[in-house]
Image (cartoon, helix red, strand yellow):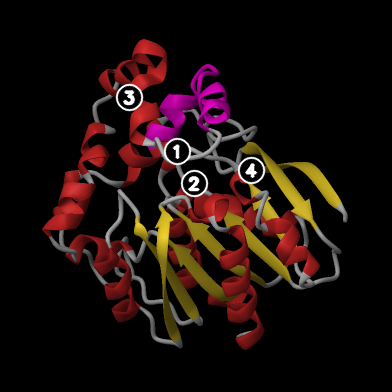
């Protein structure tokens, strides 16, 4: 199986990209979330390649081995990650691809699918629904989202996570396999702050409370076949915010509920996820 580790210079940064499978097969772009890297997809990718797909999984800016951007504002989804993904596709000569995002990778995928439908074939959002659906969710979602406000506390949040051998982070992401490797990666200079800057640049109270204009942050309509996948043991994101996402899809919509699975869908249940993706892609190829 072909697997290449590539470093692509795009949008002002050097990006690490895992590119697996035959180049002439239908491509799929897989976007990880916080606090992970492209390695989140290592158990899923071989199954997708075996089914006849090319799998492209980048380290998003500030994560893994992709460069750390200079300022908090550089982590704005529109000028940061969205432009990064488009530039990576251009560098790899990928004209159209299936699109998958998990956790913070999902908002990136929602925006890409809405704003650049000519560049993508389908969308799959894991765990995180459409931004506006998230904001319309119930009190249970507000309770689950306490850590988002905690992440806004510059310096204090970093110190709290590092304290006592990263005890708080180990507790908060207790059911994520391989947490030691993630902590090792985030212990490098600037990496923890880079990951937290994703929250600080995009999820401010002012941005969430301000009524959005049509076509701006949180109001984009997706016109690609879309599958939302949610797991019932998710500690951070509730079912309602994913189900409400159907309101923001003007195309075939599919909802899948995974029983007995935590937030970490790609690492915890790669077989079930791969089967869902392959089925979704085969229906909308």
Quick check: marks 1 and 4 in contact, CB under 8 Å? no
Of circles 4 and 3, the one toward us is 3
Q: Which residues are magenta?
A: 179-197
* Marking on residue 18: none
Residue located beneath label 4 in the image: 39
Residue 262 is left or right of residue 200, and the answer is: right
Quick one: 8 or 139, which is closer to the camera?
139
Marks 4 & 3, CB-CB < 8 Å contact: no
Q: Residue furthest front?
A: 260
Q: Which badge, 1 or 4, is on the more N-terminal residue?
A: 4
Check contact, mark 2 vs mark 4: CB within 8 A: no
- The residue at which mark 2 appears reads as 80
Say above or below: 107 vs 254: above
Label 1 to label 4: alpha-carbon separation: 23 Å
- In reply to whether residue 183 is colored magenta, the answer given is yes
Task: Rate crowding at label 2 as few (under 14), some (14 to 19) or many (20 or more) other CA atoms within 10 Å.
Answer: many
Q: Which residue is mark 3?
A: 168
Dot 3: element: helix
Return the residue at label 1.
Answer: 74
**Marks 1 and 2, Cα distance to the nearest angstrom?**
6 Å
Q: Is residue 101 above or below residue 159?
A: below
x and y percent of residue 221 in the render?
37, 76
Q: Secondary structure at mark 2?
A: helix
The answer to whether residue 227 shows anywhere in this view is yes
Residue at 32 percent of width and 15 percent of height: 159
Decide whether the magenta segment is chiefly helix, strand or loop: helix
């Amino acid at each position: 199986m072909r697997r290449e580790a590539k470093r692509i210079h795009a949008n002002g940064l050097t990006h690490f990209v895992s590119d697996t499978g035959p180049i002439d097969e239908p491509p799929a772009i897989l976007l990880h979330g916080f606090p992970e890297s492209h390695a989140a997809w290592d158990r899923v990718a071989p199954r997708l390649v075996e089914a006849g797909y090319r799998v492209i999984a980048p380290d998003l800016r500030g994560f893994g081995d992709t460069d750390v951007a200079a300022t908090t504002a550089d982590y704005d989804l529109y000028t940061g990650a969205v432009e990064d993904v488009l530039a990576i596709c251009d560098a790899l000569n990928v004209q159209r691809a299936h699109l998958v995002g998990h956790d913070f990778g999902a908002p990136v995928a929602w925006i890409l699918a809405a704003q650049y439908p000519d560049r993508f074939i389908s969308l799959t959002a894991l765990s995180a629904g459409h931004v506006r659906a998230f904001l319309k969710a119930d009190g249970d979602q507000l309770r689950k989202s306490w850590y988002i406000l905690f992440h806004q506390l510059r310096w204090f949040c970093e110190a709290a996570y590092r304290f006592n051998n990263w005890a708080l982070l180990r507790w908060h992401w207790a059911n994520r396999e391989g947490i030691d490797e993630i902590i090792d990666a985030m212990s490098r200079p600037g990496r923890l702050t880079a990951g937290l800057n994703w929250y600080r640049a995009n999820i401010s109270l002012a941005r969430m409370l301000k009524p959005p204009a049509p076509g701006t942050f949180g109001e984009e309509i997706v016109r690609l076949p879309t599958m939302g996948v949610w797991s019932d043991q998710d500690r951070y994101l509730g079912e309602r915010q994913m189900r409400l996402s159907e309101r923001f899809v003007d195309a075939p919509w599919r909802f899948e509920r995974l029983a007995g699975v935590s937030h970490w869908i790609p690492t915890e249940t790669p077989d079930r996820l791969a089967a869902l993706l392959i089925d979704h892609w085969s229906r909308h190829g």
